[in-house]
Amino acid sequence: MKGESRKATRVQFDQVHPVNLMGVDGTWRRSCVLLDVSQTGAKLEIEGSPDVLRAREFFLLLSSTGLAFRRCELVWVDGTQVGVKFTTAADKKKARNAHPS
């Protein structure tokens, strides 16, 4: 089963926990349900086509106002379920240093 290689402990929810994905540039938004979450990532059930996730990087909006969010990177897609890892500014800096322009 995909998503089982996660190192951090996962928390699964007994109730539906609706969240949204939003493009980094704010041009798209997709409703989804948070299935489980860990310190390093999450598993989501997305509504509609996963095509917008080709951007590979987006925000996971945890509140309806958008005040609670995490920047994410797509790890895997299996039908309507997706796995994401949370990214940080430090991750971006490491990636830039690994591939200098």
Image (spheres, rainbow, N blue to C red):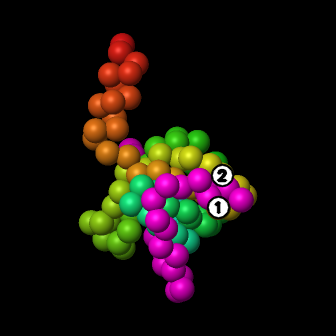
In the picture as drawn, the residue positioned furthest to the top comes out as: 101
The secondary structure type at the circle numbered 1 is: strand
Estimate the x, y position of residue 79 in percent, counting from the top left: 72, 58
Q: Are marks 2 and 1 in contact (CB under 8 Å)?
A: yes
Q: Residue 80: in sight, yes or no?
A: yes
Along the line of sight, the residue nearer the viewer: 94 or 34 = 94
Estimate the x, y position of residue 73 in percent, counting from the top left: 47, 46
Q: Identify which amino acid the numbered label 2 is placed on.
A: Val
**Which residue is pictured at 36% across the width and 57% down the height?**
70
Circle 2 residue: 77
Residue 91 lies left or right of residue 30; in this view the side is left
Residue 65 lies left or right of residue 17; in this view the side is left
Circle 1 residue: 81
Q: Identify which amino acid the numbered label 1 is placed on.
A: Gln
Along the line of sight, the residue nearer the viewer: 93 or 71 = 93
Along the line of sight, the residue nearer the viewer: 77 or 13 = 13
Q: Main secondary structure of the magenta part?
A: loop
Q: Residue 34: in sight, yes or no?
A: no
